[in-house]
Amino acid sequence: MNSQPAPLDASRVVIKKSESPKECPAPQNLVFGKTFTDHMLKVSWNKQTGWAEPSIEPYAPLSLEPSAVVLHYAPTLFEGMKAYRDDQGQVRLFRPEKNMERMNRSAKRICLPSFEGEECLKLIKKLIQIDSRWVPSEPGYSLYIRPTLIGTQSSIGISEPTDALLFVILSPVGPYYSSGVKPIALEANPQYVRAWPGGTGDAKLGANYGPSMMPQKEAAARGYSQILWLFGEEDYVTEVGTMNMFAVLKKDDGAWEVVTPPLNGLILPGVTRLSILELLRAHQKGEIQLDNVPKIEVNERDITMKEVVEASNSGKLVEMFGAGTAAVVTPVDRIGYKGKDIHVPVTSSGFGTVTEAVLNKIMAIQWGKEPHAWSVPI
């Protein structure tokens, strides 16, 4: 009688603690993504036997065959999460179940194994507890969490993975705006496309990020911080670098419309994007009050560069920002398009009104200053 492949089971975890713990660097010396904690989580998977015993062990290099499928055909996906330490010393996660849901959707898209999200979260929480001294206590600092899933079988034939590895590493990081708010300049260049219908733009795959490096490098050489990704003959706006895009437009009746592109397969369904939409809609209904934000309308709809240009020319472009885990929101003050710069208003703080309001609200929830179901204590 054939047994069923084993599910991911956090209760089976084996823990081997480091015998030579590293010294935590001074917070002010942290560079994003360069410092890693003492331990990591690893769980291997096989198509026949399922998920193996989870292991929390000292951070160390992975061992892969040169023929490992991930090195040739890129069956690899990842997530980005953070842990925050509140004023009472409690460590918190922000809507972590949403990351697990998206990770499973990404896995399905490239035939990597699915897993029980709750079990994976239990393991991540255990890993953070073991490395809790690495969670910064300084305001604005956090512990970045990078869950990753890769295909590992030794084969240069193109076929769905029969072996995989789920691993999680942790990295303490400083505040995104460590030296004050700096709005970014974007280049909207239709020469390059991030995603297309039927593609993988709505999955958080490693293969989506490598091709963005050359356009990013070229934009930087022309004085722009990031790419404003466009699609189609109409130059539909899709994403800002690796972030979701929001624009605030003034309507004829004076009300503000907050616009973000729809989840049509070209857009990554960001957790921050979802949270901003839910907060803005709650404000729209009068359920909450976002600081200094007037009457608004919230729409997930297509927006073209023609509409952005016309709004700018008519004084109806109120603000624009990117949204993602790293910074929560990033204000935009300039867009290069067809040889000209479109200037986007920002306030004296460096933010737009909506940008600053949603940033303050989300950060208050993340650091436990405002009680909310989105903030999950470990």
Image: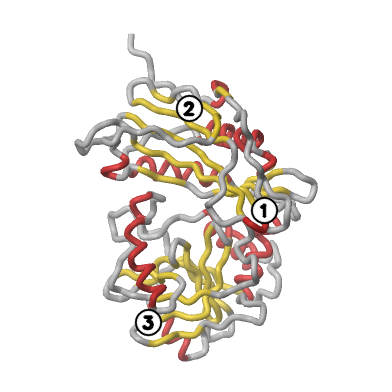
Image quadrant of residue 287? Answer: bottom right
Q: Residues within 10 Å of mark 3 (few under 14, many from 20)?
A: some
Marking on residue 366? 1
Q: Residue at x 39, y 50 (%)?
A: 203
Q: Where residue 249 sits: x, y (%)?
A: 52, 79
Q: What is the secondary structure assignment of the residue under circle 1?
A: helix
| Disc with the residue nearer the chain's start (1 vs 3) | 3
Q: Quadrant of the C terminus?
A: top right
* Mark closest to the chain's N terminus, 2 or 1: 2
Q: Give percent across and percent down for residue 272.
A: 55, 57
Q: Is residue 301 left or right of residue 233?
A: right
Residue 6: percent from left, percent from top: 43, 21
Left or right: 29 with respect to 224?
A: right
Work out which residue is located at the far top of the displayed protein and give it: 1
Among the 4 quarters of the image, the one containing residue 303: bottom left
The local crowd at label 2, few if under 14, some if 14 to 19, many if 20 or more residues have their Cα within 10 Å, is many
Amino acid, disc 1? Gln
Q: Which mark is residue 8?
A: 2
* Mark found first going from the N terminus, 2 or 3: 2
